[in-house]
Image (tube, helix red, strand yellow):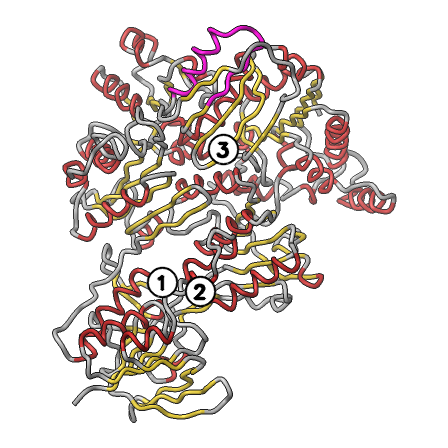
Amino acid sequence: MSKKIVVVGGVAGGATAVARLRRLDESAQILLLERGEHVSFANCGLPYYIGGTIANRDSLFVTDIPSIQAKYNVEIRNFSEVIRINPKEKQVLVREKGGREYTESYDELLLSTGSTPFVPDMPGKDFPNVFTLWNVPDTDRIYAYIQDNKPKQAVVVGGGFIGLELAENLVDRGIDVTLVEFADQVMQPLDIEMARLVENHLRSKGVRLMLQQRVTQIENQGRQVVLGDGQRLDTDMTLLCVGIRPNTALAKEAGLKVNQHGGVMVNERMQTSDPHIYAVGDMIEVKNLVSGLPTMIPLAGPANKQGRAVAANMLGLEEETYEGSMGTSVAKVFDLTVASTGENEKQLQARGLQYQKDYAYSLVHPMSHAGYYPGATPMTLKVLFSLEDGRVLGAQCVGFDGVDKRIDVIATSIYFKGTIHDLKRLELSYAPPYSNAKDPVNMAGFVAANYTKGLSDGVSVRQYLDNKEQYTVLDVREDVECAAGTIPSAVRIPLPQLRERLSELDKQKNYLVCCAVGIRGYIAERILKQKGFTASNLMGGYRSWKDWTQEVSTSMRQDTYQDKLPTQGQEITLDVCGLSCPGPIMEVSKRIADMQEGETLSVQASDPGFIRDIDSWCQNTGNALLSKSAEKGIFRAVVRKGGGAVQQSRDKEKTMIVFDGDLDKAIAAFIIANGSVAMGNKVNMFFTFWGLNIIKREGVRAKKDLMGRMFSLMLPKSSQRLSLSKMNFGGMGSRMMRAVMKKKGISSLEDLIKQAQDSGVRLVACQMSMDVMGITKEELLDGVEIGGVASMLNDNDRSNMNLFI
């Protein structure tokens, strides 16, 4: 006798199960109940329809109900919501769109009810211009609102996959986007240094990031978003993407076992605590294939595989098991690809594993394919592994091309419990347009193996910044590279000269070797260790240092500086795509040396560090950067040889060293800064010691040592807490001054600071002062750069007015 199988939910796992059930049993009675209008639609494509990448709405539907019914001979009832399960009678209670209710019996029941967006319970969440994105009706609402209202600015709340995809597609529609994220990073599957790459790319595309911030309410008919620290963001539309919750109310009411997160507990056969009820997709708990622990992984790939596996089990055929998931995922962030698999450091540490005791990682910056073949672009690949047996535990990759390929290879290795030594030995396809002879996956394995064998001791940028007193940085890059910037206080000896200049080094010191991306650093580390020195290698080199310490400005799509200056002769072109650091800067240096004064050089590069390095290189070599831009992993800059343009900028540049943290002096500093900008000056403000309190933001909790916490208790939390230098009277004086300024229509200090940032005033915080006073970068206002005395002196050299306040 054929079975009657009822499937609740027609997206991903449910739709896959229906098709598989019919292929396995032509006689089974199959009924699919879906509370919405559509089944089998492309959830993951919804943001791209909003952005216009997917032009045809019909493309979002994998198929339609008549086609499914005809192809598989199944019954589908949409607008039919299951509101109760009666396991004892093996029945479900169904409510139709019109309100009619009826019962439907089953032999086996499959729940595929998925999840829904989590909407915080806050004032304003129900305004008509506040949205979530989860299904086709949500998409239609957002699309129609944009078409009808032509919004200029939007706030996206949440920095996960959906939030970032929405931010990208709104920018593509010409909308200014601010993204608010409660955590200290976007994309939680990534470790923080990898997330920083994504954050910098978002900023370069014009997205304003506000990390460690939460939205408390939405006001003014949805036109203003209020943050936890009191800031108000003007907006035309708000999109809430703060997370999801499993739809398990039915399962709970039916008495099925659920975990602490509300996820339905199933066995390997996708069977719940009731032997006749099965479940798949976002709503269930699965086993983590790396740790073996229970978890929830709401991804389309696992849901579809579960839907396929459960069919045979429901039909009583040969058992098919679902062993678990490792959360392999990939996302597009503008022209960047971001992918991960397995566990990250947060997950490893959450289960008690310690870095450099239980696990370690390799970090490499390879090219997507052979550098000499056109179109090669860089990527950053991080592989985590066990120190006990070398087993690969997880990996993350960020880049422009070939990212998905590398993560898929490593995901396969993890599935078969591969080790870093397996990564070394993998024979992967090679041809110059597709890879290197030593693939990035191989390179990550080589670096990891060197660590386990004691050949190299890798130190991350975070480790160095937390323990700077333990290291003396040795920069082994060429002089032309160092002209674009160095780590403060670094000793500089180019690698080719190192063996001859070892006498300049002290064997009592612990040297941290730095090069561009880590390769020359490893060579130098091996030389030093074999000569009796204590040495380690900065993982990822100076590129990782810049990724971590220097934020990219918003926006870098097209920045033009001195495009009205006269040029002489023809424009010379230079294509250095495929060259990794230091290649691009060195080639620029060589070409500029052969040019005539006033001629321009148009450079095209694929190394993301180039677009930042060229700024500093021009400033330090007396050449003028006329413009720079970035698009789809290609970075372009136009450089004018000679100091004519630089000399003109000196006449219109001012630098202020802000040492004092008194309210009246801070106001004076920013009034001067804003006035200087209004008169056509470029303005640099260097904040040191007590002046750092002016550019702090309130409400940030940062991890600090004892001295840092003590300083935090004694120092003002932000500009709003500053005192007057005279007549403060326990804070009464500062309140009186603010009240008078407001009454007379004078901008507050906070407004002056915002005006300065909006006008392009460069705010730089002194790294040394931050270290002394226990102030972290997270405590500073968005857009504040971190620099040292060299940065300040470089600004002073260009300025014709220097003030000490």
Q: Position of residue 284 (x, y in %)?
A: 32, 70
Of pointers 1 and 2, the one earlier in the residue sequence? 2
The kind of residue tagged 1 is: Pro
Asked which quadrant contains residue 23, the reply is bottom left
Q: Which span of residues is magenta-colored?
A: 582-603
**Does the residue at mark 1 contact the one at mark 2 (Cβ under 8 Å)?**
yes
- Tell me where residue 322 appears, x and y as whole percent: 21, 66
> Which residue does the numbered mark 2 point to in the structure image?
244
Image-based side of 757 in relation to 189, left or right: right
Instruction: Identify the residue under disc 1.
Output: 298
- Please say whether residue 710 is one of the residues in the magenta stretch: no
Q: How many marks?
A: 3
Q: Secondary structure at mark 1?
A: loop
Eye-nearest disc, 2 or 3:
3
- Could you tell me which secondary element the residue under label 3 belongs to? strand
Residue name at image x 51 percent, y 87 percent: 98
Q: Earlier in the sequence, mark 2 or mark 3?
A: 2
At label 1, counting other C-alpha atoms closer than 10 Å, the crowd grade (few under 14, some 14-19, many 20 or more) is: some
Q: Nearer the viewer, residue 647 or 779?
A: 647
Q: Compared to 173, does 83 lie above or below?
A: below
Query: From the viewer's perspective, is residue 264 above or below residue 509?
Result: below
- Marks 2 and 3, Cα distance to the nearest angstrom? 34 Å
In percent of width and height, residue 704 lies at 48, 42
Around disc 3, counting alpha carbons within 10 Å, would you say few (fewer than 14), some (14 to 19), or many (20 or more)? many
Query: Is 126 on the left or on the right of 805, as rendered?
Result: left
Amino acid type, label 3? Ala
Q: Which mark is residue 630?
A: 3
Quarter of image, res 80: bottom left
